[in-house]
Amino acid sequence: MLGHDERRRLVAGLNGRVVEIGAGAGAMFPHYPTDVASVVAVEPDRNRRAAAERAARRARVPIRVVDGVAERLPLADGAVDAAVASLVLCSVPDVSAALSELRRVLRPAGALRFLEHVVAGRGPLRVLQRAAAPVYSRLPDGCHIDRDTLASIASAGFAIEECDRFMHADGVFEPAIPHVIGTARRSD
């Protein structure tokens, strides 16, 4: 599991109105800076949404947890200043639709902050990820460990401004896989 440092870095400097997709149990909530005016946290899973609602009550910023999916966000066009995607773009059924929705709800020049695991550029790890992908995609969260998330972000009309790559293993018996953390802006 990614640590507090990465989560804090992901949302550092955010302000205004924010949407977070795939909020899960609210792991990001304690890390939002107090300059954030409000967060709409979208989570489709009933049990995780209930946990997120409890976490929202302890947050330093106002957070409204809503039922929904990334491919159909319950927000108006240009409604938010920033969007946060943390370890979720691997599991949405239609990543292109999710990114199009994020672009739609962001104001012009709005920021997309992302923290995702991605497919390796080449070599044995990429081969392993491609081989394991059919198994991982059938697990409960439907994780696609072989998605080229950066290419998807760029194809959806975002300009990637900042992106750092790092290796991280979620468990003792799992190999470290590539992750990215960064900022993209709506390109108009």
Image (cartoon, rainbow, N blue to C red):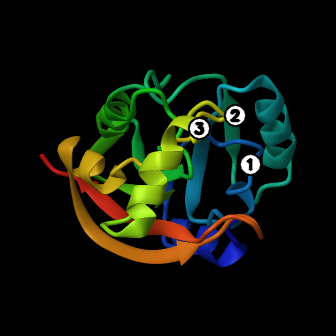
Q: Are marks 2 and 1 in contact (CB under 8 Å)?
A: yes
- Residue position for label 3: 135
Residue 97, above or below 82? above
- Residue 163: percent from left, percent from top: 34, 72
- Residue position for label 1: 26
Residue 51, above or below 60? above
Where, by quadrant of the figure, is residue 100 drawn? top left
Q: CA distance from mark 2 to mark 1?
A: 9 Å
Asked if residue 83 shows in the view, the reply is no
Left or right: 94 in relation to 100: right
Which sits earlier in the primary sequence, circle 2 or circle 1? 1
Q: CA distance from mark 1 to mark 3?
A: 27 Å
Q: Amino acid at mark 1?
A: Gly
Question: Circle 3 sits in a helix, a strand or a loop, which is it?
Answer: helix
* Residue 2 or residue 55, whichever sits in front: 2
Which sits earlier in the primary sequence, circle 1 or circle 3? 1
- Residue 128: percent from left, percent from top: 47, 57
Which sits earlier in the primary sequence, circle 2 or circle 3? 2
Residue at x-position 65% and y-position 78%: 5
Q: Tell us which disc is closer to us: 1 or 3.
A: 3
Question: Circle 2 sits in a helix, a strand or a loop, which is it?
Answer: strand
Q: Quadrant of the N terminus?
A: bottom right
Q: Amino acid at mark 3?
A: Val
Mark 3 surroundings within 10 Å by alpha-carbon count, few (fewer than 14), some (14 through 19), many (20 or more): few
Residue 187, above or below 176? above
- Residue position for label 2: 65
